[in-house]
Structures are given as C-alpha cells and as structure tokens.
Image (spheres, rainbow, N blue to C red):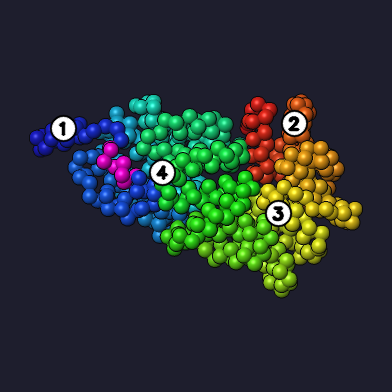
C-alpha cells in the first residue's frame, strides 16, 4: 500500500503545470461550435497525462456553450450532471494542485459557468454560492500567475455584472467579499483582454457586451466581435451579437444581412434559443423599415421558438402595430389583448403592457401611428424628418415625442441648430407612457452644448437626463449618457 501511495504522488508531481497545450484544439472546436469534433478529440486524448479534472472540464465547457445557444431543460440537466461529476473529482485531487494556476482556474471557471446558468434559470441563491467559490479560485489563480488574463477577465465580468444589481444585493456581495463595481469591472476587462492566451474569445465576447450595453461604444464592440469572429467564424453567438451591435448603431442594412445569414445557414435547428432572438431582432429590422408583413412573420417565429418570456410582450405589441398598419383590425385587437405576456422587468415588455391597455381603452389613432413611424426613422438612422404639421396634433404626449425624436434625428444628421430648437420645444411635464422623451430631450441639448464648447451647460443637461432615468430607467439611454461622459465630458461613470 505504501508503495502504491508513493507512485500516486510521483505521478501527480510530474503532470505539467499550466494550460495543457494538447487541449488547445479542443477549445478551438468548442469556440467554433463544433461540439462533436471537440468531444471526440477529448475522448481521444491520453487522460493519464493530465489531471483527471481536465477532460471533464473541457467537456463541461462544451455543455455550457450548447446551453447558451439552446436554453433547454435537457441541456441544463446534462450540464448539471457533468458539473457534479467534475466537483467530485475536485474533492479527490484538488489538494494536489494547490500550486497549479491552471487547475485553480479550472475550478473557478467550472463554478462560474454554473453560476451563469443558475442566474439564467433565476436561481439566484445557488448562483451566489457558486460565485463565492469562483471568485476565491480566480483570485488564487492570479496569486499563482498574475498574468493570467482569463482569470482577470472573469473577475472583471463578475464585478461588472454584480454592479448592475440593486444596492441591497451589492451590499450583500461586499459582505461576502465579492466586488460589485461596473466601472472597475469594465476597466479590468479591457486590460485583461490584452493578456489572454487560451481564452481570448470569451474575454472578448464579454468585453464587447460591456462596450455595447454600458457605454454604447458600438464601434469598439464591433471591432472586438469581428476579431473573435474571424478566429471562430461558425460561432453563432459572436455573429448574433455583432448583428445586435449593428442594429443599436442604426446600421440596419448590415444587421439584416447578419441576422439573415444566421437563419439561412440552418442554425435554427441547432441553436434554438439564439435563433429565436435572431428572429426577434430581424423582425425589429423589418419593423423599423416599415416592412410590416415581414416583421409580423419574424415576430411570430420568435414567439413560436423562444425559450424565455423576455421581449415576448414587445413582440406581440409590435405585431399588433403591424396588423393595424396592414389593415387587419381583428388580428390587431387579438394581438393587443395578449401584449401583457412578457417580462415586466424588461423595459420594452413593460411598455407593451401599459401601452396596450391604453390603446384598448382609447383606440389606436393616426397620431400614434405617426409617432411609431418617427420612432422607426430614429432607430433606422434614416437621417431625415418628414414634414409634420404639429399644430394639428391634439395629443401633447405624442407631440412632445415627435419633437424629441425629430431633434434626435436632426442631431444625428449634424443639423445642430434645428436639433436644439426642436429639443427646447419639448415640454418635460407631459410625456405619459413615453418615458424616453425627457432624457432624450436633455441628451440632445447636451450634445448641442458640447458642440458649442459650453461644457458646464452640457454637464447640467446631462445631469437632468440621468436624474430622470433614476426613476424611469432605460438601458439604451443610460448607455448613451455613459458614452457622452466617457468620450466628451471626462466624467466618472457610475
């Protein structure tokens, strides 16, 4: 028995430390969504050369990416089964790898992946405990290898993501020793992306999401996504997020090409969840372009295939608008009555819930349709404002909305004097269901003052926009405010 024990110790001690290069191709296949080839390569490698946890970890990584693309209970259960097997191995051998930075990273990343999935399943308590272990082990990784960009990037993403939570949750995290700071997390992600070696694409994907959602720097997000997409051209998540970036940047023709390619390449059968949202965003492209029939088909395809309630209300509501525009009043009322099925924590769904009730009670007017059309021009980046006789519009909420949108469109077109005049005409006390009117007015005025070099005035207007958003949150407008702070006013971003 003593002889066997000595052999085991010797065997462990000669395993190479650090990232096992034999698994690099496994990761490459995984990141390119070639999971069958990745799994086959894992099975073919000589497991006696490595820690027992490694093949299980890389297999778990495949299950993680498959779940993100499909979000099915079957894949969730398969991931959890493999995670528990991996955790059992950690229990038996982890003490032998206390000084191996990559093994510590493997432990951390396994718990981090599980935390992500539990969060997506809204199991927040379980996610919290997984994050505690992940943070501890990522920090241990950096003690052993301060240059491990993958660990830095993961800690940065955790800090950023937790910074999005309400203050009470952030306080609880701080007691547990887990940082929750959006600004610091963003800075850590940017720095870590430059230092990554084996996990560059994951760090890049997360960094691009922060560029998009936190500071509205769509060019930077697209640059990072294009870099990792060139490395792994078949990764549907990278392609989809690039399409979303183009849509938010008002480059809807480019967004349409990307979304259409995802659908046309047969991905809906392999990545159901991601393709469902591809249909949703493609529908938005059509909606913004006034292609009502195509938009309706795409919204319904999203509703048929989605695995989440997020944006379902928005899709139904916009389909109702499509039916109204197409002249089908029966379908319009049917869809409008169902617009409350979404997630009230999602801004677009919340709007669909309250606005659909308003339209059912008060009717869908030509004035509201004019507001929808102008919203679409704003989102599509058309650069032109139709001639409206605003004196004939009786609904002051709609009138204010059209003034604010016209100002924003003029600003996009660099017609600063027109933009400022229109923005100053917006009455801030009459916005009704259109909560975006007030912050959009002040954002336009901020940019006009910046172009006139009146930075103090600009900061004042931006503060008004942000103060309003403290009560009526809009993630896209908050990201725009952060963009202005970061790129024009050199102000601290919360």
Q: Earlier in the sequence, mark 1 or mark 3?
A: 1
- Could you tell me which secondary element the residue under label 1 belongs to? helix
Looking at the rendered structure, the secondary structure element under dot 3 is: helix
Residue 451: numbered disc? 2
Can the viewer see residue 308?
no
Residue 164 vs 371, above or below: the answer is above
Which residue corresponds to mark 4? 231
Q: Of callouts 1 and 4, which one flags the residue occurring earlier in the amino acid sequence?
A: 1
Q: Which residue is mark 3?
A: 376
Horizontal and vertical percent position of residue 239: 49, 50
Task: Give the Cα distance between marks 1 and 4.
Answer: 39 Å
Identity of the residue drawn at 67% across and 56% down: 288
Q: Secondary structure at mark 4?
A: helix
Query: Residue 270, relative to residue 157: is it above or below?
Result: below
Q: Which residue is mark 1?
A: 10
What kind of element bears circle 2?
helix
Q: Earlier in the sequence, mark 3 or mark 4?
A: 4
């Amino acid at each position: 028995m003593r002889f066997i024990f000595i052999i085991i110790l010797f065997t462990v001690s000669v395993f190479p430390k650090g990232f096992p290069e034999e698994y690099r191709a496994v990761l490459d296949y995984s990141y390119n969504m070639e999971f069958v080839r990745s799994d086959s390569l894992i099975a073919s490698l000589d497991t006696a050369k490595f820690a027992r946890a490694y093949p299980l970890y890389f297999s778990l990584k495949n299950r993680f990416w498959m779940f993100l693309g499909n979000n099915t209970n079957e894949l969730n259960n398969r991931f959890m089964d493999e995670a528990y097997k991996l955790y059992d191995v950690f229990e038996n051998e982890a003490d032998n790898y206390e000084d191996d930075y990559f093994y510590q990273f493997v432990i951390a990343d396994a718990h981090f992946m599980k935390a992500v999935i539990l969060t997506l399943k809204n199991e927040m308590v379980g996610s919290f405990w997984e994050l505690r272990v992940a943070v501890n082990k990522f920090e241990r990784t950096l003690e052993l290898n301060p240059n491990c960009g993958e660990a830095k990037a993961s800690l940065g993403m955790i800090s950023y993501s937790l910074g999005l939570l309400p203050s009470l949750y952030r306080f609880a995290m701080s007691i547990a020793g887990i940082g929750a700071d959006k600004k610091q997390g963003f800075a850590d992600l940017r720095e870590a992306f430059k230092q990554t070696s084996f996990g560059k694409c994951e760090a890049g994907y997360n960094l691009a999401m922060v560029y998009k959602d936190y500071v509205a720097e769509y060019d930077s997000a697209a640059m990072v996504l294009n870099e990792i997409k060139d490395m792994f051209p078949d990764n549907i998540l990278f392609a989809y997020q690039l399409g979303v970036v183009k849509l938010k940047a008002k480059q809807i023709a480019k967004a349409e090409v990307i979304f259409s390619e995802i659908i046309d390449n047969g991905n809906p059968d392999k990545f159901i969840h991601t393709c469902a949202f591809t249909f949703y965003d493609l529908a938005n492209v059509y909606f913004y372009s006034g292609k009502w029939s195509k938009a309706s088909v795409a919204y319904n395809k999203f509703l048929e295939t989605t695995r989440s309630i997020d944006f379902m209300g928005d899709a139904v509501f916009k389909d109702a608008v499509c039916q109204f525009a197409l002249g089908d009043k029966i379908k319009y009322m049917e869809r409008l009555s169902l617009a409350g099925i979404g997630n009230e924590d999602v801004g677009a769904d919340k709007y669909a819930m309250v606005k659909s009730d308003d339209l059912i009670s008060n009717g869908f007017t030509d004035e509201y349709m004019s507001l929808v059309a102008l919203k679409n021009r704003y989102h599509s980046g058309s650069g032109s404002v139709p001639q409206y006789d605003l004196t004939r519009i009786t609904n002051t909420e709609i009138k204010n909305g059209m003034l604010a949108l016209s100002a924003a469109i003029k600003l996009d077109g660099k017609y600063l004097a027109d933009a400022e005049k229109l923005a100053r005409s917006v009455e801030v006390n009459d916005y009704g269901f259109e909560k975006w009117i007030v912050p959009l007015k002040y954002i336009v005025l901020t940019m006009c003052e910046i172009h006139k070099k009146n930075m103090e005035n600009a900061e004042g207007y931006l503060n008004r926009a942000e103060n309003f958003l403290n009560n009526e949150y809009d993630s896209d407008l908050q990201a725009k405010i952060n963009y202005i702070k970061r790129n024009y006013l050199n102000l601290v971003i919360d």
